[in-house]
Amino acid sequence: QKEVEQNSGPLSVPEGAIASLNCTYSDRGSQSFFWYRQYSGKSPELIMSIYSNGDKEDGRFTAQLNKASQYVSLLIRDSQPSDSATYLCAVTPSGAGSYQLTFGKGTKLSVIP
Amino acid sequence: DADVTQTPRNRITKTGKRIMLECSQTKGHDRMYWYRQDPGLGLRLIYYSFDVKDINKGEISDGYSVSRQAQAKFSLSLESAIPNQTALYFCATADRALESYTFGSGTRLTVV
């Protein structure tokens, strides 16, 4: 079974620090990778997508992808208390019969003021 | 208006009652999904549909049924609710490449 693994946390960082969230995936054929942010009791919202090896930056967020190591990460610079949420990693599965994104169970981030 | 609208937002119901959760979308996506989310278990797929005539069971479909009334509407029913169906339920839509996945705001269901 194709899986996406994340450390459940909680990951606690002080305000202003860099938060590093990690994700590994088992499907070597996956081509697209996503990070969703989910506040408690709310729906997941897409914050980053990445398709090629390397880094992709968007404001305070940087997604990093290493397909050889089957590893994707999300860095949050200058972390703010409003970044406290659960972060879900998701990948598109390979194969013609793929019908849904494969989600990790999420890492809970807590930014301490 | 939201791209994916779920109703109701919150619902408390009694064991044995029938309940329907509704989802409508303006994304124009063919694919629609129903997930439930429980603490520590992540998102689990209940049912998914690729069009009005194509409905498929997910990993936890027992106790649930669905109806795709139109391309934009996908409803989830609990025929006889039980307490362990207490959860947060999400409807989602996606394009064929699975690269535009959008969630509804969720329904918090409590079965007492």
Image: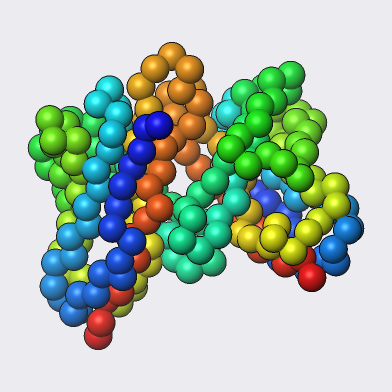
The answer to whether residue B82 is above or below residue B24 is: below
Could you tell me which residue is drawn at 37 percent across and 56 percent down?
Answer: A106
Residue B88 relative to residue A59: left or right: right
Q: Quadrant of residue A83?
A: bottom left
Could you tell me which residue is drawn at 27 percent across and 22 percent down?
Answer: A29
Mark count: 0
Could you tell me which residue is drawn at 85 percent across and 52 percent down?
Answer: B80
In x, y percent, where is residue A3?
A: 36, 38
- Is residue A59 in sight in this rendering? no
Of residues A22 and B32, the one drawn nearer to the viewer in this rendering: A22
- Is residue B17 in sight in this rendering? yes
In x, y percent, where is residue A23?
A: 25, 48
The answer to whether residue B4 is above or below residue A81 is: above
- Judging from the image, the colouring scheme is rainbow
Q: Residue furthest bottom?
A: A113
The answer to whether residue A48 is above or below residue B56 is: below
Q: Residue furthest right?
A: B17
Of residues B21 and B5, the one drawn nearer to the viewer in this rendering: B21
Q: Residue furthest front?
A: A1
Q: Residue furthest top?
A: A96
Could you tell me which residue is drawn at 69 percent across and 25 percent down?
Answer: B55
Residue B1 relative to residue A63: left or right: right
The quarter of the picture where the C terminus of chain B appears is bottom right
Of residues A57 and A24, the one drawn nearer to the viewer in this rendering: A24
The answer to whether residue A25 is above or below residue B50 is: below
Residue A96 relative to residue A4: left or right: right
In x, y percent, where is residue B66?
A: 76, 37
In x, y percent, where is residue A113?
A: 25, 85
